Image: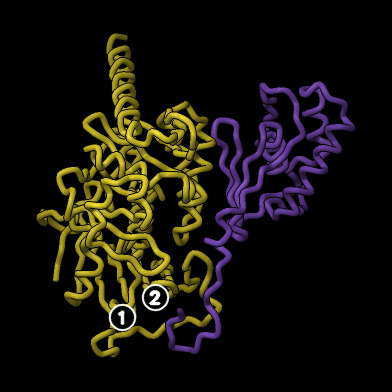
């Protein structure tokens, strides 16, 4: 089970498209339609098996393919520290599966790193007490 | 020295401790000057320690408190203060949202970079606006009697050149680097903060009319030139306009310039990271606001071709069509 890497990550859903900001790394992400669905499921506490059960029939794709795609997607999301491993009871009551209108494609996140310098620049070094750093 | 500003219908009082501080931090804001009509919603005290050094505050936190975006992770105990320190400009910003007071200090105003005076007090204004349910946005805004367009994009996309070109073509100008947006009951609106433009020194090569604005402007090596527009184009500086659309410019050399509808999520992608990653403590309030904004107005992609002089007319036509669309929708609503 996974959870959003709060408070370092904020996701917004804009008319079905999910955009995620990572305030630790300065990277930001755009999820494709099936990625947005999977993201919502993971954030609601669903596991990969439950998502496969919901997505495969709606996608018209065999469960093994969806499972493999979701494992790859989850690895990307945890590798980018957007999701973290979570334990405990899932709050799945809040989740409603709503299949995208487009044909199935493997859930994926497009990564943007062009603004990392805004957050990763660390100019504070060796400041003496009482001084104002440059 | 006191100055009063009117920003998005609210009054802000600036109290400068020296003429040097006023000369450095006021010109970009001068176009917002107003007469005092009562209590200010925000009072900002601005001073530096270049004269004697004795008024320099001593930081009560250690090195570990400094965080990205200039945030200072320190609490005075009651949690009412927001603090940020920009090591590039050495500006310390402190805001008390309960008392409506803010402080801006730096060691020596004479060493403050030009980019800071092009967009002064933005951290304090960001916190103040957020508290009022409004949002500073990294973007430009231009318009006319039909309303305003918010131009938002990553650096190098032609946003600033588009805004300046629109100004030179006689359109109203609300800002280049940062503007203030509101989503009030009356509808989305955009408000001016800074009457400045930061221009690449080579810009007159593509926009020759900029030469007249840049002839006495100067820049530090490697920096853009800051133009103070209140001096040159005061009649075209607008304080506030209703927001009609979000426009995301992008370069398309070899083509003709054109506008095309854009998914709101793509507009959000252009706006949100560059805004949220630069403003201290910007978080869910900012991202939620921007999500609502791109869903509240239509969004367009502006493909900037070789015919740069044609762009202001495209923008004017867009404003007119959006105003007509809203008028028709309003008439249909009244007829029911």
Of all chains in the rendering, the one displayed in purple is A
Q: For residue A92, which numbered disc appears in the image?
A: none
Q: Quadrant of residue B54?
A: bottom left
* Above/below status of B210 relative to B72: above
Q: For residue B108, which numbered disc appears in the image?
A: 1
Q: Nearer the viewer, residue A61 or A115?
A: A115
What secondary structure is marked by label 1? loop
Q: Answer yes or no: do the residues labelled 2 and 1 have beta carbons within 8 Å?
A: yes
Residue B19 appears at what percent x and percent y?
A: 17, 75
Residue B147 appears at what percent x and percent y?
A: 27, 32
Q: Nearer the viewer, residue B276 or B319?
A: B319
Of all chains in the rendering, the one displayed in yellow is B
Q: Residue at x 67, y 50 (%)?
A: A4
* Above/below status of A128 relative to B179: below
Quadrant occupied by the N terminus of chain B:
bottom left
Q: For residue B90, which numbered disc appears in the image?
A: 2
């Amino acid at each position: 089970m996974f959870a959003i890497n709060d408070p370092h990550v904020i996701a917004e859903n804009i008319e079905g498209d999910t955009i995620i900001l990572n305030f630790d790394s300065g990277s930001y992400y755009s999820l494709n339609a099936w990625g947005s669905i999977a993201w919502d499921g993971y954030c609601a506490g669903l596991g990969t098996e439950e998502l496969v059960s919901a997505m495969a029939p709606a996608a018209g794709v065999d469960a093994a393919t969806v499972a493999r795609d979701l494992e790859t997607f989850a690895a990307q999301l945890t590798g980018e520290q957007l999701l973290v491993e979570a334990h405990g009871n899932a709050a799945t009551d809040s989740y409603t599966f709503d299949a995208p209108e487009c044909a199935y494609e493997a859930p994926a996140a497009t990564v943007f790193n062009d603004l990392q310098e805004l957050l990763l620049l660390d100019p504070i070094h060796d400041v003496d007490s009482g001084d104002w750093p440059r | 020295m006191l100055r009063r500003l009117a920003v998005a219908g609210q009054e802000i009082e600036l109290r400068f401790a020296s003429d040097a501080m006023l000369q450095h931090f006021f010109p970009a804001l001068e176009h917002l000057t107003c007469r005092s009509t009562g209590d200010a919603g925000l009072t900002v005290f601005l001073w530096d320690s270049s004269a004697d050094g004795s008024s320099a505050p001593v930081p009560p936190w250690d090195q570990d408190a400094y965080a990205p975006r200039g945030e200072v992770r320190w609490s005075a105990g009651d949690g009412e203060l927001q603090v940020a320190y920009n090591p590039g400009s050495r500006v310390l910003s402190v805001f008390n949202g309960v008392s409506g007071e803010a402080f801006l200090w730096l060691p020596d105003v004479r060493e403050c970079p030009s980019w800071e005076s092009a967009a002064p007090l933005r951290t304090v204004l960001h916190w103040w606006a957020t508290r009022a349910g409004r949002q500073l946005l990294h973007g430009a805004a231009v318009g006319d009697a039909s309303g305003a367009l918010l131009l938002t994009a990553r650096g190098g996309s032609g946003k600033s050149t588009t805004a300046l070109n629109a100004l030179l073509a006689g359109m109203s100008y609300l800002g280049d680097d940062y503007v203030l947006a509101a989503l009030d009951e009356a509808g989305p609106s955009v408000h001016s903060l800074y009457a400045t433009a930061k221009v690449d020194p080579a810009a007159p090569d593509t926009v020759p009319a900029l030469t007249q604005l840049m002839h006495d402007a100067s820049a530090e090596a490697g920096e853009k030139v800051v133009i103070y527009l209140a001096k040159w184009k005061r009649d075209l500086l607008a304080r506030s306009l209703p927001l009609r659309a979000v426009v995301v410019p992008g370069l398309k050399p070899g083509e003709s310039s054109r506008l095309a509808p854009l998914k709101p999520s793509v507009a959000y992608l252009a706006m949100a990271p560059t805004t949220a990653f630069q403003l201290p403590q910007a978080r869910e309030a900012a991202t939620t606001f921007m999500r609502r904004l791109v869903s509240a107005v239509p969004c367009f992609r502006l493909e900037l071709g070789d015919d740069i002089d044609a762009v202001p007319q495209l923008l004017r036509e867009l404003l007119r069509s959006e105003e007509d669309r809203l008028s028709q929708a309003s008439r249909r609503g009244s007829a029911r």
